[in-house]
Amino acid sequence: MVEWIISEEPVAYDAACGWMEARADAIARGEAAEAVWLLEHPPLYTAGTSARPEDLIDPDRFPVYRSKRGGEYTYHGPGQRVAYALLDLNRRGRDVRAYVRQLEDWVIGTLDAFNVKGERRTGRVGVWVVRDDQPLTASGVPREDKIAAIGVRVRRWVTFHGIAINVEPDLEHFGGIVPCGIREHGVTSLVDLGLPVTMADLDVALRQDFERVFGVAPR
C-alpha cells in the first residue's frame, strides 16, 4: 500500500527534504511503505542540479535552496500543490525515464478531471497548456504556459521529490527566476485559466488518477 500524507500548513523546505531522505532510506531497507506527501511550501526558490546562475533574476526576493533533484530553478509557494512521491523502483521497474513519463501522465490525467488539456513538449520538462484565450505570440502561434513542474531524484532506486501543480499561487512570484530555464514561455495556474479549483478538489483528482498511472506495486 502507498501511504498518503496531507499537510494542512506550509512545510519548510529543509524539513521536507530531511523527511524524504529518512523515508526513502526506510523504504530501501524494506522498513516503510511507499508514500505520497501532499503539501505546500512558504514562498521560496529551489535550484536543481542543472540550475544556471543567470536564471536567478532576484536572489533576494525569497530564500533560495540548493536541491539535489534534477532540473533548474523552480518556485514553490502557497497555492501550489506539491506532491512528493517516494516510490520503490526496485519493484516498479528500474527505468527513470519511464518514471518521469508516468509523473507527466499523472499530471495530465489529473488536469483532465477539470477539462484542462495538459501536454508534453520535447525539450521542456513539465506539463504545458495552450492558451487559446490569449493573443498569438510575435511568431503567430498560440502562447503556451507551464502549469506543472517535475523534478526527480533517485537513490537506491527509491524516488524523491515529484510534481508541483499550480492551483492558485501568486504568479508574480515566478518573476524572480527563469522557471526551469525557459525564457520564451510563461506560467499559469488552474485559477488563472478561469477554473475555481480548490486544493481539496485537486487532491481528490490526484488520488483518483494515481492508481491508473502507477498501479499497485508488486510485492
Image (spheres, helix red, strand yellow):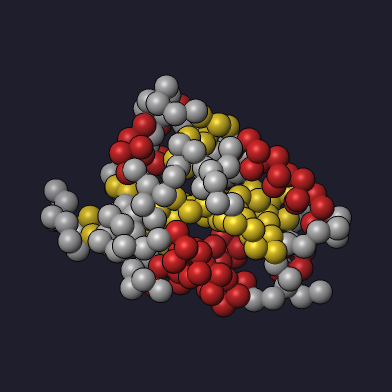
Expressed as whole percent of the image width and height from the top left, the position of residue 25 reads 80, 49
The picture quadrant where one finds residue 27 is bottom right
What residue do we see at 20% from left, 59% from top?
A: 142
Of the 4 image quadrants, the one containing the C terminus is bottom right
Q: Nearer the viewer, residue 83 or 153?
A: 83
Q: Nearer the viewer, residue 186 or 44?
A: 44
What residue do we see at 81% from left, 59% from top?
A: 32
Q: Is residue 75 left or right of residue 172?
A: right
The picture quadrant where one finds residue 132 is bottom left
Query: In this view of the protein, can residue 98 be seen by the observer?
Result: yes
Q: Is residue 165 above or below residue 2?
A: above
What residue do we see at 71% from left, 44% from top?
A: 19
What residue do we see at 58% from left, 32% from top?
A: 66
Expressed as whole percent of the image width and height from the top left, the position of residue 10 reads 53, 43
Q: Is residue 29 left or right of residue 187?
A: right
Of the 4 image quadrants, the one containing the N terminus is bottom right
The picture quadrant where one finds residue 53 is top left
Expressed as whole percent of the image width and height from the top left, the position of residue 192 reads 28, 55
Q: Nearer the viewer, residue 125 or 112?
A: 112
Q: Is residue 151 left or right of residue 94?
A: left
Q: Nearer the viewer, residue 78 or 212?
A: 78
Query: In this view of the protein, can residue 122 be seen by the observer?
Result: no
Q: Is residue 191 above or below residue 50?
A: below
Expressed as whole percent of the image width and height from the top left, the position of residue 17 reads 66, 41
